Amino acid sequence: MLRTLSVAAAVRCPLRLSRPCPLPGPLLLGLLSRQVREAAGSAGAECGSVLKTPKGTRDHHPAQMALRERLFGTVVACFKRHGAAAIDTPVLELRETLMEKYGDNSKLIYELQDQGGELLALRYDLTVPFARYLAMNKITNIKRYHIAKVYRRDNPAMTRGRYREFYQCDFDIAGQFDPMIPDAECLKIVHEILSELQIGDFLIKVNDRRILNGMFAICGIPESKLVTMCSTLDKLDKMPWEEVRNEMVGEKGLSPEAADRIGEYVQLHGGMDLIEQLLQDPKLSQNKLAKEGLGDMKLLFEYLTLFGITGKISFDLSLARGLDYYTGVIIEAVLLQQENDHGEESVSVGSVAGGGRYDGLVATFDPKGRKVPCVGISIGIERIFSILEQRMKASGEKVRTTETQVMVATPQKHLLSARLKLISELWDAGIKAEMMYRKDPKLLKQLQYCEDMGIPLVAIIGEQELRDGVVKLRDAATREEVDIPREELAAEIRRRLETCTTGNPAAPQPLPSC
Amino acid sequence: MLRTLSVAAAVRCPLRLSRPCPLPGPLLLGLLSRQVREAAGSAGAECGSVLKTPKGTRDHHPAQMALRERLFGTVVACFKRHGAAAIDTPVLELRETLMEKYGDNSKLIYELQDQGGELLALRYDLTVPFARYLAMNKITNIKRYHIAKVYRRDNPAMTRGRYREFYQCDFDIAGQFDPMIPDAECLKIVHEILSELQIGDFLIKVNDRRILNGMFAICGIPESKLVTMCSTLDKLDKMPWEEVRNEMVGEKGLSPEAADRIGEYVQLHGGMDLIEQLLQDPKLSQNKLAKEGLGDMKLLFEYLTLFGITGKISFDLSLARGLDYYTGVIIEAVLLQQENDHGEESVSVGSVAGGGRYDGLVATFDPKGRKVPCVGISIGIERIFSILEQRMKASGEKVRTTETQVMVATPQKHLLSARLKLISELWDAGIKAEMMYRKDPKLLKQLQYCEDMGIPLVAIIGEQELRDGVVKLRDAATREEVDIPREELAAEIRRRLETCTTGNPAAPQPLPSC
């Protein structure tokens, strides 16, 4: 049985827990305890009030940046593999550009002080600026990615690991195309990225706004209750249907009969079989919207079958997603975890990607209301980063924070000039090299620095080497030393480090063990 | 003769003209005319008021992003070659962190609306947040780079090409080391980057705050007038000494004698000879600060000689730089241009890098006032970007905005499934591949897309190829077609594109001609 504990995701930010989790899994607990410390803005211990970052923000240290660079590297490589171009938009937008795009969440937008001139705000996501960009530049056809920070004046509730400044990682396809081909590619991308990152088993849920709307209609739920019903429905992740039904009938004032009709549908999930079954459903197949959505869902699954990825895709009628602007397919990927104490049971430990089709958003910016159909996904990079960071800590793996290939060292005093001359030659030959900023450092200290920083090679130049026109090249791991003619040093360093390139193309640096 | 028209650079942002230039060089004029259009925030032509980016900000299109990626690639490669680690700090800082750090320029800081909670502002540069980071985390020793956006509510005066949101590209070395070794490395880095970018001839000016202060002291200029005198001095770039002298005596109320004494010094520039000469100067050598500064300048030039870069370094007594926080070496790099109508005359067309030593800034954040000496440089990435962009436009070079290696195409109808299956195989093999999002696109349209996007190869799969278990691989440039066994396709694509890798390591993409 598959039980999901927490799915998340306000407004295309699928990585953030939007509610407290009554039954957190062990991984989630681990993550949150860390995030509790960080969520309130990190601060030095004995410092005055000025010595902190703002609430909900944090600095990134070199080790975190190295990990982030690897993570972004994998994601960007995938986006580029699918032919995406990069764009960038300002962090600042006119306040009116963002207003009325996020419903209730608009209150979370950071506004700038009126210092004269335009009224400004910080972007809340990358999707609305993308739509503004398309309309403003009259672009009707683009495949782009955008990785950048967004800002939400969210309550950084301790238990939810929610940041106020965080990265989004978006891939979107804009343009009028044949149905479901770009939508299928978006799912393929999520599948590729989550597979490559090896962050554990995952499931990609799909649904369609049209199927949801049709389903609500045939169950006799008035359109005015659609939004509130979706938000209740969303809780099916972490409470049984009975409780969700109680809320629908009690709090939301739905008739018990309507609730039961909904209940029949939203507990369904599956693949092509379920789509075929619903296409035969006497009530649902009579609804125009639902029928259209189901037809496209069938097409989508045909394409996903050709991609060979249906094993991790679930057509899930309970998937609603919060956002008003979705008009077709909606997507959400969750990580699964075997619960230790329940044996076989898979538990969702949170959303790591989300997205969907939004065919109407660009038109809201176009003076003539011209539509540019769009579909896109957002990778929950912050959540994934937390998982990788925690795993790295647990494994004790030391991340290199620099890519230095060789340390230039001297074994005697009065050799600073020799060091400066040699390191300059290496830099000019494109070798990544460091030396200590001391006139006469002890050799032991220089070797110690090498070890601390994981620098694989040491180029030692002493009086004897200067006389002989050689440099002693030392392997930091084996401590083996060989004299190399000075003019061959750069080539030799390059040769040595090529032979120990690791198999991970995402790693931007030679590993310390090399 | 070397005449500088405009040097720039408020607060480590060496790329921005801080004053109107009475005598702009031809390149500068070209740049400005473009920037005039952009500086006020770009907007669509027929759009309502909402359809624009905020004043002083702009979107970056795919071609600009591709160029920016190459540029950042070159800069980051250099920073990494010198052993720097990356850090990141929030765009938001507490208002009190930034206040009183920028003198008069504090009025240019963007402040956020008080929406309850902390009072926040957008970072004005990367240096003050770096100092805050060091003090907060008690880091006394780090070599880091940081490339990120900063914000200045500057008047985006049309003629100055000034943006309100722009990138800074900083490299800094923090720690207590032997004199001038890290300082020399900073100059080496500027030299390497400006050489590699091939944006034209350049000159790196250096001076020392202590020499400036000593010089002012022995000329009888009271300390209270130091700041205002530095700002007048700064104008020596673009007006002759006589005019600068008039301003000093007239507006600033300096005695003619004091002005003449200053004049003797500030018109001097040179190398080791000048340093030796000033060390013998009866007045200057009696001043403790100046003597210390000159001694270190001599050491610096010794190291720069070992690096082989003194040819492009000028010890320039008129270099002042605006910032209060510098305490030792100050640096500014300018591009030079042969003036057409004056034959041999070299003209500075603007600052492209700047920096210096700031040994006291971290202590202003430390509760116990502990010092962490720092020296750093900032590459004027926006100015350089403008130059490269203009050059690219002039040359008509087409920038590829994607890295797609192969287009998967079908020559007949009803082959969407075949295309989807093949492209999926290629993606899974790590090949960058695209196809048209159409059920039955015409072959010509598919080839046209290839040409438009600069995709070097086409993998054509038709009925015959499907029967034969092959794929027709077409070279987009030569139009040559060869049947390749399907299972060898990915390897063949990789082999073909490896053989035409260009020599430019900064290029993140195979060039269209490949």
Image (cartoon, coloured by chain):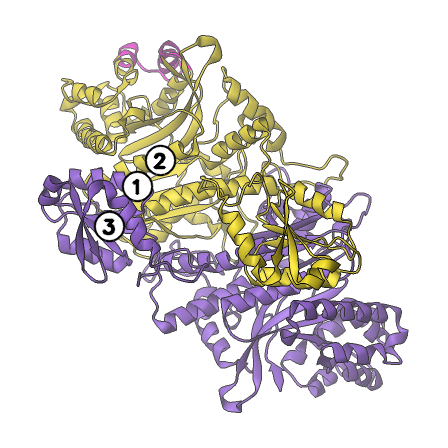
Chain colours: A yellow, B purple
In the picture, residue B238 is in which quadrant?
Answer: bottom right
Q: Kindly identify which residue carries mark 1.
A: B427
Earlier-in-chain disc, 1 versus 3: 3
> For the residues marked 2 and 1, what is the alpha-carbon distance in whole angstroms?
9 Å
SS of the residue at dot 1?
helix
Q: Position of residue A498 (x, y in %)?
A: 49, 48
Does the magenta portion include A440? no
Q: Kindly identify which residue carries mark 3.
A: B407
The quarter of the image holding the C terminus of chain B is: bottom left
Q: Position of residue A429 (x, y in %)?
A: 55, 61
A368 in relation to A60, above or below: below
Label 3 is placed on what type of residue? Met
Label 2 is placed on what type of residue? Glu
B235 in relation to A448, above or below: below
Asked whether disc 2 touches disc 1, contact meaning CB atoms under 8 Å apart, the reply is yes
SS of the residue at dot 3?
strand
Residue shown at the point (68%, 62%) measured from the top left: A468
Identify the disc placed on residue A507.
Answer: none
> For the residues marked 1 and 3, what is the alpha-carbon distance in whole angstroms?
12 Å
Residue shown at the point (36%, 47%) measured from the top left: A80
Magenta range is A239-260
A216 in relation to A72, above or below: above
Label 1 is placed on what type of residue? Trp
Crowding at mark 1 (Cα within 10 Å: few <14, some 14-19, many 20+)? many
